[in-house]
Amino acid sequence: KMKTARTHDQLYLKENRYNEPKEMFKFIEKRAFKKNTIDKKICDFGCAAGEFLFYLKKKKPKNEYKGIDIRRDLLNKAKQYIPEASFKRGSVLNKKISKKNFFDISFLVGVHPIFDDFEKCFSNLIYWTKPRGEIFICDMFNPDPVDVIIKYRLSKNYKKSTFENGWNIFSKSSVSSFLKKNKEVKSFNFEEFEMPFHIKRQRDPVRSWTVNLNKKKIMVNGLSIIQPQTLLKIKLK
């Protein structure tokens, strides 16, 4: 069996973009929060160093915020920037990390492509979210009916047997089929995200940049993949 690891998240320890939020954060927040979104229990699953939670708290302070992540070092950093939020160490694959029907709004941003199967973490999000609650999952979804599993390693490590994961692209078709069968799901829709400006290529080939394609700014990186960045919104019954 191929050995895999996920070390790329270490970069979040070095970065400090709390006051320069990602365009994707703005895109999600506009669609997730209404003017009167207050007194809601909100969780960012796979919150990393808390940059998204920091942005949400700034935009809508009158909610209860929680962040869950597998990495203790990232959670420690998040606590420094958002002391008002609560944090917990755990995996989105572990159903026991939260109570059933607990959150009004659940977020999963930039996480699900790490896994070779999307069903477990999506099922857990539905389990943790209250009836009539909403779930927002943002990252790549293939518009074509093909699920793509990707493993990679930097060429400087080509003698090593361990590959990195984190860029799997599940199809809208497969995800739709799964959600339609779930009795707790009322409705769902996909919305494409496009960067409003160009991003330059960086030294790290795994970091994304933009190229022009079909009159759109498309995200790519050194894995030779086009990234169909998409927001999936799920409403529960």
Image (cartoon, rainbow, N blue to C red):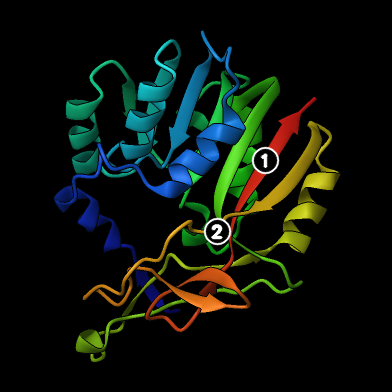
Pair 2/1: label in front = 2
Q: Is mark 2 on a helix, strand or loop?
A: loop
- Left or right of 211? Residue 87 is left
Q: What element carries label 1?
A: strand
Q: Name the residue under label 1.
A: 233
Q: Which residue is drawn at 59% across and 66% down?
A: 228
Residue 202 vs residue 185: left or right? left
Using the rendered image of the protein, determine whether residue 92 is visible from the camera's viewpoint. Answer: no
Which residue occupies 28% across, 15% down?
84
Query: Where residue 11 sits: x, y (%)?
Result: 22, 57
Residue 117's place in the image compared with 124, above or below, is: below
Q: In which quarter of the image is the N terminus?
A: bottom left
Q: How many labels does the image show?
A: 2
For disc 2, the marked residue is: 194
Residue at x-position 18% and y-position 33%: 76
Identified at 14% across, 52% down, the residue is 14
Q: Which of 7 and 137 is in front in this view?
A: 137
The x and y percentages for residue 52 are 38, 37
Task: Give the amino acid type for the residue marked by disc 2 in the picture.
Answer: Glu
Residue 38 image offset from top left, x and y in percent: 52, 10
Q: Which badge, 2 or 1, is on the more N-terminal residue?
A: 2
x, y percent for residue 177: 82, 55
For the C terminus, the image quarter is top right
Is 79 placed left or right of 100 in the picture? left
Q: Label 2: how many residues lie within 10 Å, few (<14), some (14-19) or many (20+)?
A: some
